[in-house]
Image (tube, rainbow, N blue to C red):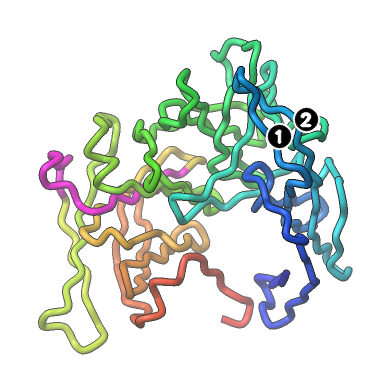
Amino acid sequence: MIFIPKNNPLNFESINFDTGGLGATSVGYGLREMPEDTVCELWSLNLIPFSLNVAGQITGGKSTLLSVCKKPGSAPYIAKDHLADYKFPYLDGFVRADEYATLSDVSGKIVEMPLDVPNIEITGMPAGFPVQSHPRGISLKASSEKFFIISVDSVDGQDHNTDVFVRTASDGKWKRLPVPAAATTATDRLRYRLFDDWLATSLSASLAATVTNKDAPDADVLTVTTQGAPPGKPTITVQPRSKPDSSSLPARTLTLYNLADSRRIAIAIPEDDSEIVHVFDGHSVLLRIKDALFFAEIHGSKLEDYKLVAQDSAIPMVHWAFYSSAR
């Protein structure tokens, strides 16, 4: 495993980490904790597979928790069953439909439930959800030192994005988020990415056609044009558009939510292979549309001043970005 510091990416460190062929569960994988500037990749590994009894209850099973960590000024290390590491999940979000992190509501507390390990309590539930006799499913969408974002499963045990909340660390209060109520499918789901105060959602046309989101902001339609443009220098045109009907939905709608001041920005893109890669300094957005990267500036509740950054056949593989101090 390699740890790359954002402010000096050439000064990276690595540590050998072998799971020994053990499978990873979706409970802890990919989460990181932040106290004392320590960064950990948290793994919940299955030592003994679980099984379901006739009542549908999990029986048997055993897991181990491994934290692969790096603290400033110290060499990387691996810790086993450090439950405290898992109390501070840190998750930037997901870029693929098959990625997810699951938590549970147990007696009004949001917890991780590794097999054969005591429940790890993270925080209390939002108000309005009655205490149940059995655990309620919680999908962790994104989390940082400032925000904790979850979706509460519906009564059918599925995540339909109907109850999505953000907890702000500064005051400990929960707030409902105005995101589309998009029921996930086996190959598609509403995706979330967190960039400091900005939460980005990515919604495909196939999901958008199944929901009515009257609270959604009007989206600007982006079109990438190569015809008449210099080689390797496509241009973006932006046209305001009211909410389209389902017969003319763009391939993907990206929305930016400012969790600090409630601003929302929506852009509709005909190319499905598109995503917000990063938001720098709270106002510069790096947007990928297929094989091209563009910068845009946030002005109020609009994205403006689009500029081509790069275009290459390798760019469809770009999903994350950061600036080093040597920029």
Q: Earlier in the sequence, mark 2 or mark 1?
A: 1
Q: CA distance from mark 2 to mark 1?
A: 6 Å
**What range of the chain is rendered magenta?**
241-258
Three-letter residue code for mark 1: Glu
Above or below 68: residue 318: below
Left or right placement of residue 294 versus residue 20 in this view: left
Mark 1 Cα shell of 10 Å, populated few (<14), some (14-19), many (≥20): many
Residue 9 location in percent, x, y?
Answer: 66, 78
- What residue is disc 1 on? 112
Residue 196 location in percent, x, y?
Answer: 56, 52
- What residue is disc 2 on? 119
- Label 2–label 1 contact, CB within 8 A: yes
| Residue in the picture at 50% in, 63% down | 280
Left or right placement of residue 89 versus residue 186 in this view: right
Residue 92 location in percent, x, y?
Answer: 57, 52
Q: Is residue 255 magenta?
A: yes
In which image quadrant can residue 244 be found? top left
Q: Is residue 224 magenta?
A: no
Above or below 233: residue 180: above
Mark 1 residue element: strand
Mark 2 residue element: loop
Three-letter residue code for mark 2: Asn
Locate the C terminus and report the quarter of the image it occupies. Answer: bottom right
* Pick the front one: 2 or 231: 2
